[in-house]
Image: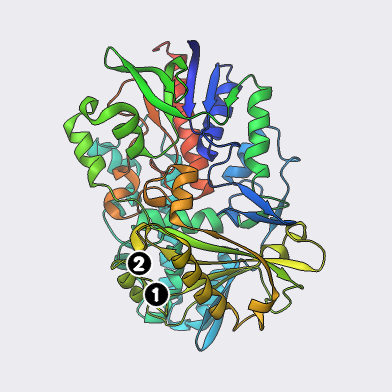
Amino acid sequence: MTDTDVIIIGAGMAGLTCGCLLAQKGLKVLMIEKNKKVGGCCTSFQKEGFSFDLSVQSLGECQKGGRIWSLLEKLDLLNEVPFIPLEPAREYHFPDQKVIQSSKLETHIENLSSLFPNEREGIIKVYTILKKIYDEFTSVPSSFNWFEPSSFSARYPYLSRYRDRTFAELLQESVSHPFLKTLLSIRSSYALLPLEEISVVGMAGIEMSYFNFGVSCIEGKVEQLPLKMGEAFQKMGGTILISHEVDQILIGERRAIGVKLKDGQEMTGKVIISNIDAYHTFSNLIGEDRIPGGFLSKLKGMKPSLSYFILCLGIEGVLEELPVSNNEVFFEKDLRKEYQSLSKNQISEEAPFYLLAPSKVNSSHAPKGKSTLCLSYKTTYHLSRDWGQQIKDELSRRLIKRASVFIPHLEKRIAIKVETTPKTIEQWTCNRWGAAYGWEQTPRQSGIYRLPRTTPIPNLYLTGHWTSPGGGIAGVVASGELTAEAVWSRFEKGEQ
């Protein structure tokens, strides 16, 4: 039995952030990771000389002043993790036109205003509100009582006004052109939701984490970020147990007191932090009989986000056909139809897809004279019963056929291919149903309605995309910082 100050279950980006900040304060921190390396979704793999990032291709808030940049500055890692700014950020391809999206908000607004000159005022209004919501949300201290109505509405008027509203409602009151609404909401796809379902608060996080401090790729592999953070954590005295899985959170006198591993080892700690799937944390690691009925009911009523099918390809030749590395292809301007099919556990023939060419930015991802290509669909976990080779082959065939419009003779140029399914993501991260972003960012699961960092089990905290502010690397880094702040406050007050 090992005793420590803080035990963190899961070494994803939120767990690493939280662990580094607490170890930096001098606390004795133990991190336990079931995989062979840290990073969670922010990891990479190699095959036959090609390098692929599992799911994270680009990041927001990595340029000077951004949240990730500031964290690396605190950890003295700015020179260890170089970033490559992306400008433009991406291209959107529609049947009759192509739209280039800048990573700079002012340029983005000007580009949209030139397409829709009569809607300029409304475009500015949308982004002004999103920025105010984002600024309010990122300034909320971990100790703030969300549920004191007068204090909340006075200090955070935009969060209060829009906390129950969808992005479609904001657009309805701001702009009128249907295609402009499509373009303004197009990045709701990064939350895997249509504009009629995504919350304004969730959309604010997605948009402003990119536009405030630009869009970047990590030079080299994306896993350099968590691996360097893991090294920094250990230099500060922290301990990481890799290839070890927690089997049980130990409860004594109705409070969390430690963990038991699958191999039978037990460790005790003053504080336990879960950076893994919230449902698994409470239902499996603790047991539903120990969870208050109201909290358990809320937990069971929350819905995880959708997932992805990702096809990673090693390609012969340089992809000169693609002017930028990040592309999204749409076959119709009404984005709702895709989600209507997904609600029936189907991917329609006209479903949009992502067309990413990482080696255009990072030449080290492919051998000389070759390229990497990542094609992906949004999907549900229940599209397939077992995600066997038959469904993988079918989706791969469809993606290759669609991408061949942009890259002639693509199929003949394929050197290697690797498929990632929702089941793959579930196995790697333990995320229920292979959820890519924790809970869906609907109004009832965003902002103040997301699971809090504190839990009904004393001494047990949450961090990561199951709590606020939500998914994405910048979002989970923010969550890690806020959880660290809440835990450190307890130690400062001597409340262990």
Q: Which quadrant of the structure image shows residue 368?
A: bottom right
Q: Secondary structure at mark 2?
A: loop
What crowding class fits label 1: few (fewer than 14 Cα within 10 Å), some (14-19), or many (20 or more)?
many
Q: Position of residue 17 (x, y in %)?
A: 55, 34
Tell me which amino acid carries mark 2. Answer: Leu
- Residue highlighted by disc 1: 181
| Camera sees residue 141 | yes
- The residue nearer to you, when weighing 488 against 330, is 330
Looking at the image, residue 351 sits to the left or right of residue 313; the answer is left
What crowding class fits label 2: few (fewer than 14 Cα within 10 Å), some (14-19), or many (20 or more)?
many
Q: Nearer the viewer, mark 1 or mark 2?
A: 2
In this rendering, the answer to whether 94 lies above or below 33 is below
- Residue highlighted by disc 2: 195
Tell me which amino acid carries mark 1. Answer: Lys
| Camera sees residue 471 | no
Residue at the image point whose x is 52% and y is 75% from the top: 397
Residue at the image point whose x is 58% and y is 22% from the top: 23
Looking at the image, residue 341 sits to the left or right of residue 231; the answer is left
Q: Position of residue 295 (x, y in %)?
A: 22, 35
- The residue nearer to you, when weighing 119 against 385, is 385
In this rendering, the answer to whether 190 lies above or below 414 is above
In this rendering, the answer to whether 413 lies above or below 239 is below
